[in-house]
């Protein structure tokens, strides 16, 4: 813990100082102060924890004003924790799991993160009909596993996120609901098998929609267009990721 | 009901005859017999109702030994109703709704059916990823509507069936669950809008699997291969269609 | 032929008149002129030929300023033939062959066209990977045939057009080249079998690109975006369709 | 070259021996024999070159009787070269380029090959419509490059093969012709950029079909089913790969 960044610690020290120095001259006070200065000067100043958000267009937008990463940053500031975390967005539109794999050396490992949020999967499912180049479920698992193992090898704290939605209807009638549930299941299993933390956005979004989408709308609840987050979606994502980050 | 085809009716008549003719000469017996012959000769002999099962590979298999159409036929025989219905299978593997539309003149209308079961939809969804030639939901509705209207114009009794399954997992993780639910919903709406009868196989199969598939298996409950019916599936289909037919 | 619309005919008539009236007084000239006026007054004024352009987004854009239909209209005006033809755009973005079939009663037959250009096929191929809802080649042929037969039944002059391009590379490396060639071949066969006229845009565009696309560019030659026509593309389409129209 | 494996060499030596030893005692003969033994004992016995064929179902079938790998083996035997090469099939049905990437450590690198044939690409294109999980062209290139680089790092001799065919029609009307040509082009560029040898099966098969498929058949020329090799196809593949191997 950095003394400079922790006003409580500093205050406490001063009080202790006063207590010790009770009734003594100002000389004693200065003496103690210099000792403190001397000690802190050689204490390693603690670096903020580097957090990388690794994902697709949802994360790319998350790093823009109003995006979920910006909201996490704001919330940390409000809690007086902004100096403790260094947030980095690493989202690229259209990315599938193997895109993350292919660019993880450059975009993640080279930056030596302490914590990595992985939020991927929507395009692996969606591109099956959009371009004919989705990802088979078993390959999805293999590349996801390879990403986890590379991060584990460096003792990075890993937080997996399940894909939230392609359509917000609540009665399992969004075209990709079955497939998206399946891929979310793959990620849940990986989090269990490799002891990774999990933010289960698939469940979070479905529960939110069940309570807040009585008209069974396809979009406009947490997304703008069935996939990309609107203001409420970004806030919900920020809340849940921050909660997990601070656990 | 045709007397000639109903031996019970005939027997009953004879007995009644004997009762009336008790102690009378054979002349009386012959006299009554001729009256009966005379009456039945001018009674319109009732033709069996022609029932066409219009669909895809599930229906094509349904007309083979062990198939659901054969089981309906057997059940009618057991009920002594086999003379009342003339069952015709008109299923072709790989068919989508517009295949039905394209061949309905030859395969349905030309045969003047009294009743038509329409069971289509699996390939309209499945072929989206299998060949890239599935059917858009709005076109599915348009062609289905056109089929209904052509049959309505001839006052045919129409019984719509929703597609049963592409995968039997119970937790909405079969790849096409969302899409299949959507297309089943289109058919439900059409049955409501055009006052057609409905056998909601999508619901029937889902409920059956919820109760009988505790291991969340992908196939082997009512299907052999996620789509095509096994023995239990054919029996369940036969039961539900017969129930609707006799309503 | 309407005299009013055919200045050559008028001139010829006048000359004949002069010939007959040679050396006669102006009275004779006026007399003949009144006879001509009298005759034409009771001649049925010939209605312009109604031409419908039936297609997808390419045709939808064709009816807008700069589009190929507007260019045909301008060319007819320049030739003094604008009164002879009534051009109607009937293109809707995203249409496939069965969309044309489904809306042909309302959008074509109800308007009693004399001539119909059919230009469809790009989406039947393209949507195989774009939405998973392309059209199987055999169904493409069936619906196209049904459209031709409905028009033939009314003795409409039919001009088929093959789909031009999805990508303009000249070495058969555009993703859909093989499939698009196949569907163009289906249309060529139909034009042969049903004695329909043909504007073979597939060949026309490929030949143009071979001569004018030395850099093997994917777009920017006759299209803006691999599919939709730029200025040159609209002009080429207009030229070829007008040439066929006036044959 | 190992003397033990080369009887010609041995024979030659003996003759030389006899020539020198003419009229001498058996002692001299034994003396020379021991010298030969001594010399060969310290000569490194040359191991056969390990050749791995790395690919999909075409290569999986290639390792079976009648397959192209067996035919290469037979041809080497006929040339008296069977001891020089150790042929290993490493083909798995359905494999795409990233399947090769994922299993190359186990199936290729662990076996320390001297030479690797890479023959992949058909499924990367084909699966776009078959399962919706084909490979984007740019990712195809990235994974292919990664495979090349891993092999280059070990100084393995690499021979790239372009995908041969999905359909054998000669007029660019096979559905995937455009896409397959594109992916073959990617491989040609990689062979150029990374100085890898190339067996351009795409060109070889197209040229063969142009000369031997006058009826423009879809299959039956070099393939059984548009993709998998028949007898002639396996022989042609064997001939071309052997030719390249022995260069």
Image (spheres, coloured by chain):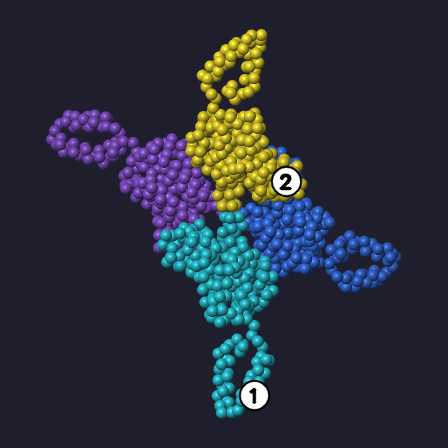
Chain colours: A cyan, B purple, C yellow, D blue
Q: Position of residue A48 (x, y in %)?
A: 55, 71
The residue located at (35%, 46%) in the rendering is B200
Distance between mark 1 and mark 2 Cα atoms: 85 Å
Q: Nearer the viewer, residue D120 or B32?
A: D120
Q: Position of residue A99 (x, y in %)?
A: 56, 56
**Within-10-Å neighbours for mark 1: few <14, some 14–19, many 20+:** few
Left or right relative to B230: residue C158: right
- Label 2 belongs to which residue? C170
Mark yes or no: residue A141 visible: no
Rendered position, B226 above or below A238 = above
The residue located at (55%, 12%) in the rendering is C17
Q: Position of residue A49 (x, y in %)?
A: 54, 70
What secondary structure is marked by label 1? helix
Left or right relative to B66: residue C62: right
Q: Which mark is residue B117?
A: none
Quadrant of the snapshot with the C terminus of chain C: top right
Rendered position, C109 above or below D15 = above
Which mark lies nearer to you, 1 or 2? 1
Mark yes or no: residue D84 visible: yes
Q: Which mark is residue A31?
A: 1
Left or right relative to A47: residue A184: left
The residue located at (37%, 40%) in the rendering is B118
The residue located at (52%, 60%) in the rendering is A63
Q: Quadrant of residue C234?
A: top right
Q: Position of residue A143 (x, y in %)?
A: 55, 58
Which chain is indicated by disc 1?
Answer: A
Q: Nearer the viewer, residue A68 or C105?
A: A68
């Amino acid at each position: 813990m950095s003394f400079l960044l922790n006003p409580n610690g500093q205050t406490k020290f001063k009080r202790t100082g006063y207590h010790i120095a009770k009734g003594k001259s100002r000389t004693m006070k200065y003496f103690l102060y210099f000792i403190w200065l001397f000690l802190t000067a050689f204490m390693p100043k603690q670096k903020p924890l580097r957090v990388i958000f690794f994902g697709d267009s949802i994360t790319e937008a998350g790093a823009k004003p109003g995006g979920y990463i910006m909201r996490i940053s704001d919330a940390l500031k409000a809690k007086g924790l902004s100096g403790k975390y260094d947030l980095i967005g690493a989202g690229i539109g259209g990315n599938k799991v193997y895109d993350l794999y292919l660019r993880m050396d450059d975009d993640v490992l080279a930056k030596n993160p302490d914590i990595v949020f992985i939020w991927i999967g929507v395009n692996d499912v969606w591109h099956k009909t959009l371009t004919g180049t989705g990802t088979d479920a078993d390959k999805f698992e293999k590349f996801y596993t390879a990403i986890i193992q590379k991060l584990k090898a460096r003792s990075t704290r890993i937080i997996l996120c399940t894909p939230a939605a392609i359509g917000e209807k609540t009665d399992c009638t969004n075209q990709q609901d079955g497939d998206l549930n399946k891929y979310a299941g793959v990620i849940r299993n990986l989090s269990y098998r490799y002891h990774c933390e999990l933010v289960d956005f698939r469940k979070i979004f479905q529960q939110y929609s069940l309570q807040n989408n009585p008209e069974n709308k396809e979009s406009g609840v947490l997304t703008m267009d069935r996939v990309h987050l609107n203001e409420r979606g970004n806030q919900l994502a920020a809340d849940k990721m921050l909660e997990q980050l601070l656990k």
